[in-house]
Image (cartoon, helix red, strand yellow):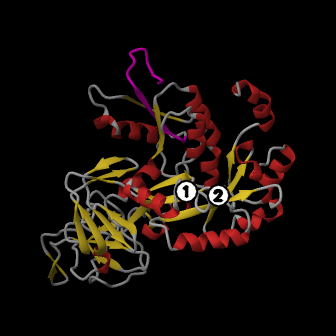
C-alpha cells in the first residue's frame, strides 16, 4: 500500500492531463464535496508539459508518457485521469504498480449502463466526438451507444417537436436546466427543450417542459415508458436482487433479451415474458472458466462433457474453455470438427475449444486458430503431455509466429524437469 503523506491517510491523485490551471482549479472545486472527514485525501494536479487542452488525437497521444512519469513519481494510493478522452489510460495502469487508475470516460460510461439501456455523450468538439466513438467501439458497447453530439454554446432553444418526429438539427446545449432521468431506457438525457414560460407562446402555453432523447436512428423516445414500447419488453426480468457489477454491488433490476443481459436498472414499468423474484439473492453475470479439462473423449470416469458442463452451470459458470489433451487430442481439422459436433448434443453451457499446437501441425495453426469454436491454441512445453510436447526453442518460436491470436502455454523447461526428476523419485 502506498501512502501519500506521513499521516498514513490514503490519498487519491486526480490528474488533469493538460496545462490549464483554470481547468485544474475548476476540477479541484468540484471535488470539494467528496473530501469527507475520515475519507481519503484528494489532491488535484495538472501536467505542465501537456497541451492547453485535449482537442485532438495528437493532443491525447502527447500526454501519454508525461502522465505515466507523473504516476511513477507519485506515492498516491490511486489515480484518476480527469479528461473524458482517457488519454494514456492503459499505459498509466501498466506503470502504476497495481494501484488503481481510473479514467472518467470509462467509469462514466460504465455507470451510465446501470441507469438505462442506452447511453449518449455530450462532447465539446467534433474531434472529441470522433475519439468518443472510437472509445465506445473499443469497449464493445456500440449496440448500446445512442451517439455523441457536440455541445454548441449560445444556441437559441427551439420549441419541442411532436413525439416521434425526426430532426436534422443538432441537440440543444445540456444546460443547468437539463435533468437526466432513469425512466428512459434509451440513455442519459441529451437535452431538455422548451424552457418554462409564464406566458403564451404562439397561442399555446409553454409552461410544460418536454424531455426527449435522440436514438441512433434519429428518432426520439419519451421519458414516459410506453406499454407497447419493444425497448421496454424483455424475455426475462430479474427483480429485487443485488447485482454484482464491475464497480460494486447495487440493488437494481436486470433485463434479459435474446439470452443476454440487455439492461441494468430496468424501470419499474418494463414488462417481460417471465419475472424472477431475486429478493435476498445476489445476481451475477455468467462467469467464464478459461482452463478446464473435461477429459472427453478418452477418460469418462474422470469427467464428461455432460457432467462437467452441468456442474459448471450449477456453479454459475456460463462458458468453459476445454483443453485439447484428450484421447485422441484435438490437433487437426477433422478431430476439431468431430469435437464440435460431439459437444453440440451434450453440453449444458457454451464451450470454447483449445486446439493443440504440436511439432507436426505448426504450418496449420494459423488456419486452426480461426476455426469455428476455437478459443485459442494450447502449447505444452513439458513432458506431462509428451505426445503434444514442444520443448525446444526452435519449434516454440515457430508456434508463436504461426498465427495472430494469443497462445496458452503449459510453461515448463523440459531440460530442467528431466535433470531434477531423480531428486523426486526416491
Q: Position of residue 167 (x, y in %)?
A: 39, 81
| Mark 2 or mark 1: whose residue is earlier in sequence | 1
| Distance in Å between CA atoms under marks 2 and 1 | 8 Å
Residues at badges 2 and 1 in contact (C-beta under 8 Å)?
Answer: yes
Report which residue position mark 1 lands on: 294
Residue 7 located within the stretch drawn in magenta = yes
Relative to the observer, which residue lies in front, 361 or 54? 361
- In the displayed orientation, state which residue is furthest to the left: 198
Give the main secondary structure, helix, strand or loop, of the magenta stretch.
loop
| Relative to 333, 346 lies left or right | left
Report which residue position mark 2 lands on: 326
Q: Residues within 10 Å of mark 1 (few under 14, many from 20)?
A: many
92 relative to 182, above or below: above
Question: Which residue is depicted at the point 39% across and 57% down?
Answer: 285
| Residues in magenta, as a range | 1-18
26 relative to 212, above or below: above
Q: Position of residue 71 (x, y in %)?
A: 56, 32
Q: Quadrant of the C terminus?
A: top right
| Relative to 396, 48 lies left or right | left
Relative to the observer, which residue lies in front, 89 or 418? 418
Q: How many marks?
A: 2
Question: Which residue is depicted at the point 33% across and 58% down?
Answer: 114
SS of the residue at dot 2? loop
| Relative to 421, 143 lies left or right | left
Give the quadrant of residue 164: bottom left
Amino acid at each position: 500500500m502506498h501512502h501519500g503523506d506521513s499521516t498514513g491517510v490514503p490519498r487519491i491523485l486526480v490528474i488533469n492531463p493538460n496545462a490549464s490551471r483554470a481547468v485544474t482549479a475548476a476540477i479541484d472545486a468540484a471535488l470539494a464535496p467528496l473530501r469527507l472527514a475520515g475519507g481519503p485525501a484528494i489532491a488535484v494536479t495538472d501536467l505542465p508539459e501537456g497541451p492547453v487542452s485535449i482537442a485532438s488525437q495528437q493532443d491525447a497521444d502527447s500526454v501519454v508518457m508525461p502522465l505515466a512519469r507523473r504516476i511513477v513519481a507519485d506515492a498516491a494510493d490511486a489515480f484518476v485521469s480527469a479528461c473524458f478522452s482517457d488519454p494514456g489510460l492503459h499505459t498509466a495502469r501498466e506503470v502504476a504498480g497495481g494501484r488503481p487508475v481510473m479514467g472518467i470516460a470509462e467509469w462514466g460510461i460504465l455507470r451510465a449502463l446501470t441507469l438505462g439501456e442506452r447511453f449518449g455523450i455530450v462532447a465539446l468538439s467534433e474531434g472529441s466526438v470522433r475519439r468518443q466513438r472510437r472509445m465506445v467501439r473499443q469497449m464493445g458497447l456500440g449496440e448500446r451507444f445512442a451517439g455523441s453530439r457536440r455541445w454548441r454554446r449560445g444556441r437559441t432553444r427551439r420549441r419541442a417537436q411532436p413525439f416521434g418526429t425526426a430532426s436534422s438539427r443538432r441537440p440543444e446545449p445540456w444546460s443547468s436546466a437539463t435533468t437526466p432521468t432513469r425512466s428512459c431506457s434509451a440513455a442519459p438525457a441529451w437535452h431538455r427543450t422548451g424552457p418554462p414560460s409564464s406566458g403564451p407562446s404562439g397561442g399555446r402555453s409553454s409552461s410544460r417542459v418536454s424531455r426527449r432523447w435522440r436514438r441512433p436512428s434519429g428518432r426520439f423516445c419519451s421519458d414516459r415508458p410506453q406499454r407497447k414500447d419493444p425497448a421496454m419488453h424483455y424475455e426475462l426480468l430479474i427483480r429485487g436482487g443485488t447485482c454484482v457489477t464491475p464497480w460494486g454491488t447495487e440493488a437494481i433490476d436486470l433485463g434479459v433479451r435474446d439470452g443476454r443481459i440487455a439492461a441494468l436498472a430496468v424501470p419499474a414499468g418494463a414488462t417481460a415474458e417471465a419475472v424472477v423474484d431475486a429478493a435476498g439473492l445476489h445476481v451475477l453475470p455468467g462467469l467464464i472458466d478459461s482452463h478446464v479439462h473435461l477429459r472427453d473423449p478418452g477418460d469418462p470416469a474422470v469427467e464428461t462433457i455432460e457432467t462437467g458442463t452441468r456442474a459448471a452451470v450449477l456453479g454459475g459458470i456460463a462458458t468453459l474453455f476445454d483443453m485439447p489433451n484428450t484421447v485422441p487430442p484435438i490437433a487437426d481439422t477433422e478431430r476439431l470438427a468431430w469435437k464440435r459436433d460431439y459437444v453440440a448434443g451434450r453440453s449444458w453451457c457454451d464451450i470454447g475449444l483449445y486446439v493443440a499446437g504440436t511439432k507436426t501441425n505448426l504450418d496449420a495453426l494459423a488456419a486452426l486458430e480461426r476455426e469455428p469454436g476455437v478459443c485459442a491454441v494450447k502449447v505444452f512445453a513439458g513432458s506431462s503431455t509428451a505426445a503434444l510436447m514442444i520443448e525446444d526453442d526452435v519449434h516454440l518460436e515457430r508456434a508463436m509466429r504461426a498465427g495472430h491470436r494469443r497462445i496458452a502455454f503449459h510453461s515448463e523447461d523440459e531440460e530442467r524437469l528431466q535433470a531434477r526428476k531423480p531428486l523426486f523419485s526416491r
